[in-house]
Amino acid sequence: MTTVSVEDVADQDRKAPGRPRDARADSAIIEAVLELLSAGQSADALSIEAVAAKAGVGKATIYRRWPNKDALLIDAVATMKGPLPVPAGESVRDDLVMLVASMRNKRMQQYGKVTACLLPELLRRPEMHRIYHGVVEPRRDIFRQVLRRGIANGELRADLDVELTMLMLSGPTVAQNMLHWNPNVPDEGYAEALVDAVLRGAAA
């Protein structure tokens, strides 16, 4: 029997013929999901009925766009992340500061609560975990490109572990966004301070 993944079903639904989708309804539905999760609603307990009520639409409106809750959650996560940042490409330090700062803006701090509510689902269900990584992987790859460019042009050590360095830059930021893990670390100047701390060991 052929296995169809959640994203395959969602993609088929997006391509299905019929009347054009209302972008305002799409936005209201996605925003309703994010608001419910930000308020502490777990992904497991989240219902299409609650989303519909919050968005001010009927359940049928949601099901015309997303075949199930998983597909809706995937699109909500992708929307939450926003457009991919574009490094200037002139200075590795400046590009890393920009990338870290893009993870620490007010929007991402708010959505840190959403990620925290999604964690049980990601840990419990390998399929959702895989899909989540698929959503964030393009952002990781931008970090990789900046670090590899720094190695190539001599700004960074030739033996630098790119994956570990990327984790050192993103891990603390995720922890601060989700848990405000260390309240003694100020928000102002956070990106610069973190990048400079990492570069003390990573710079050529």
Image (cartoon, grey):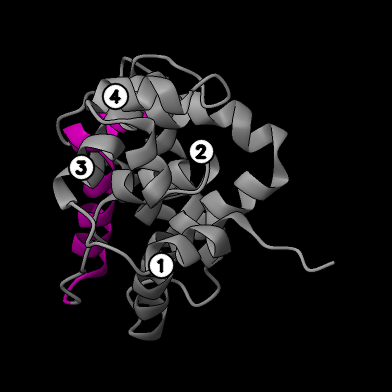
Is 63 drawn above or below residue 118 in the view shown? below
Which residue does the numbered mark 1 point to in the structure image?
A: 16
Mark nearer the viewer, 1 or 3 = 1
Picture quadrant where residue 33 is located: top left
Which residue does the numbered mark 2 point to in the structure image?
A: 69
How far apart are the alpha carbons under marks 1 and 4? Answer: 28 Å
**Upstream in sequence: badge 1 or badge 2:** 1
Secondary structure of the residue carrying tag 3 is helix
Q: What residue type is labelled 2?
A: Lys
Q: 159 or 59, which is in the foreground?
A: 59
How far apart are the alpha carbons under marks 1 and 2? Answer: 18 Å
| Segment tinted magenta in the rendering | 90-112
Which residue does the numbered mark 4 point to in the structure image?
A: 35
Q: What residue type is labelled 4?
A: Glu
Instruction: Give yes or no for residue 103 being in the magenta stretch.
Output: yes
Secondary structure of the residue carrying tag 2 is helix
Q: Residue at x 36, y 56 (%)?
A: 199
Mark nearer the viewer, 4 or 3 = 3
Q: Position of residue 198 (x, y in %)?
A: 39, 50
Q: Residues within 10 Å of mark 3 (few under 14, many from 20)?
A: some
How far apart are the alpha carbons under marks 2 and 4? Answer: 15 Å
Q: What residue type is labelled 1?
A: Ala
Instruction: Give yes or no for residue 5 being in the magenta stretch.
Output: no
Q: 164 or 44, which is in the foreground?
A: 44
User: Are discs 4 and 3 less than 8 Å apart at CB?
Assistant: no
**Upstream in sequence: badge 1 or badge 4:** 1
Secondary structure of the residue carrying tag 1 is loop
**Upstream in sequence: badge 1 or badge 3:** 1
Q: Where is residue 7 in the image (x, y as percent from the top left)?
A: 54, 59
